[in-house]
Structures are given as C-alpha cells and as structure tokens.
Image: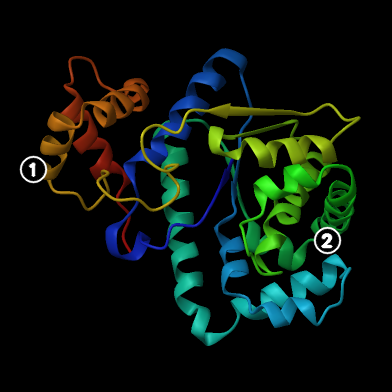
Amino acid sequence: MGFGYNPDLSSLGERLDILNFFSWMKKIKDVEQTKWFIYDASGYYIVNRTPERSILKLGQYPKAGQILEVLAAEQDKSKRKDIMENCDIRRLYLEKLIQISEIGADYIDSRDVFRVDERYQRALDAALCTVRKLEVDNPQLLSLIFPKNSNSASRLYLPLEIAEVIYLKDVFGVECKFGPETELWFDDAVLEAMRGATYQARRCVSGPRKPGYLSDRNVIWTCSPDNFVDTLLKYDTEYRTFVERYASPFKQQGEFLEDCVKRLRDELRVSI
C-alpha cells in the first residue's frame, strides 16, 4: 500500500480517515495472513515542485539515473525544506498507524529508496519503457492518468509508481498492490508493466471524501476538538457511515462511535 503527500500535516495533524486503509489491511491480514509493506510515496511530491525546464533539458528519453538525480537535487534545496519536514512527519504517522492497527507491516521510505538503491533505478528504467510502450499501444489510458496541460515533471508520477511496484516485487517478493478505487487507471498501467508475472491490484472504496492520505476539509483530523467530532458525526450521515465502517475493527467492547473516534484521534497524535 502506497501513501501520497498531505501538505497540512504540520498544521492540522493527520486525517483519521487514513485508518480506512489500515482497517482494510487489518481485515485482509486476519483472513489471508497477508504480509504488508507500507510504501511512503510522499517524497514523490517533489515532482510537483520540480521546474519543467529541469526535466526538458534531460532530453526526450532521459535515463532513470538522470531523473532521480534531478529529483534528489530538488529535494535538497533549502526552499524545499517544508516538503521534506512534512514527509518526516508523515513517516511518524505511518509508523504510529502500523502500531495502532497491529498489522506488523514493514515501512519503506521512497526518499531512501530512490536515493541509495540502484535496484530502484533499474526498476525506473523498466517503468519508463512501459510508459513509452503505452504511448503507442494505449494512449487513451495515459490520457486518463496524466493531468490536462501537465508539465513534463508531473508526468513522472506514473513511471515512478510503476517503478515502485517492480522494485517491491523484485526485492521483497510483493505480489499485490493495494489502494483506493481512485487508482484504477494507474493500476491498469501497473498491470501492463507486470504482464507475465504473478501480480494483482486490489482496491477499496474511498468514502465520501478524498482518499485518507490526502488533504481535505470537513473531516476529522488529530487536531479536531471534541465538539467538532460530535457535530460532524451527528449531522453528516454519509460521512458517519464511512467512519463507522473503518473504525469498526478498532472499537472496544461497548464503545460508542464518538468515543472510539476520539480515542483513536488521541492515540494517533505524534509529537512534532
């Protein structure tokens, strides 16, 4: 399961809705004895801040090593310090979520992987080849994935995600990617890259808000006061149903939903 970037962690804390994924992972582990890997992809957000000219100057078909060098250099810039600090905070939350959910997952930071592991570089070269093949064989799929009027940097998200799948399978034997239903088109591209290998892509519903690892409003955060939690769960029935579903595996005997949510909120808080 990969987790993207949330820019509000330093100011608002973590969204409790991120537990939706850990709830599913806990249920699947209980039934299938699954071994989970948490891949922290928040470091990829640097793609959004990388100037297009930095990618264009690499040429039409840059090598993985060139791309990763540009991204690492962008991360190291002093003006990107806020991004790196936010990624550090997400790491603390994901480690706490692994502990709360008791899924025994291994945590992997994408920043470490693409900086020091040559196996990821090889995986990215293979992913870039897959994307070039899709440009010829299935341009319609790529049009569903790439943002309209996107710059050359933002188009790196797809090969980076395909590369993580190849890397995790080659290095750790991971044979399934899990994520929200909003990743359908990405999953189709991933499965194309993994054609001929034993591999699956499984998805869960995201609920009435954005996927829980992203930022959103009118949701429960670790900073949300008790009265906000009570009011939101009382009057937004669709959201309440969603929260009740993902909180269910973590409820204590006889515990009301509001009390469960506040307890989980407090348990998830980290010292920043």
Question: Which x, y percent locates residue 63?
Answer: 88, 68
Discs 2/1, front: 1
Q: Which residue appears at 20% of the width and 25% of the height?
A: 257
Question: Which x, y percent locates residue 157?
Answer: 67, 57
Q: Could you tell me the amino acid type at mark 2?
A: Gln
The mark found on residue 121 in the picture is 2
Q: How many marks?
A: 2
The reply, left or right, for residue 12 in relation to residue 53 is left
Upstream in sequence: badge 2 or badge 1:
2
Q: Residue under circle 1?
A: 227
Sort mark 1 into few (<14), some (14-19) or many (20+) by Cα contacts within 10 Å.
few
Q: Which residue appears at 26% of the width and 43% of the height?
A: 220
Secondary structure category for the residue under label 1 = helix
The reply, left or right, for residue 244 in relation to residue 134 is left
Q: Nearer the viewer, residue 68 or 59?
A: 59
Q: Nearer the viewer, residue 253 or 256?
A: 256
Question: Which x, y percent locates residue 36?
Answer: 61, 33
Secondary structure category for the residue under label 2 = helix
Q: Nearer the viewer, residue 250 or 70?
A: 70
Q: Could you tell me the amino acid type at mark 1?
A: Asn
Image quadrant containing the N terminus: top right
Q: CA distance from mark 2 to mark 1?
A: 49 Å
Question: Which x, y percent locates residue 60?
Answer: 87, 71
Q: Is residue 110 above or below residue 179?
A: below
The reply, left or right, for residue 114 in relation to residue 231 is right
Q: Which residue appears at 78% of the width and 29% of the height?
A: 199
Q: Is residue 135 above or below residue 150?
A: above
Q: Is residue 34 above or below residue 48?
A: above
| Residue lying furthest bottom | 78
| Residue lying furthest left | 227
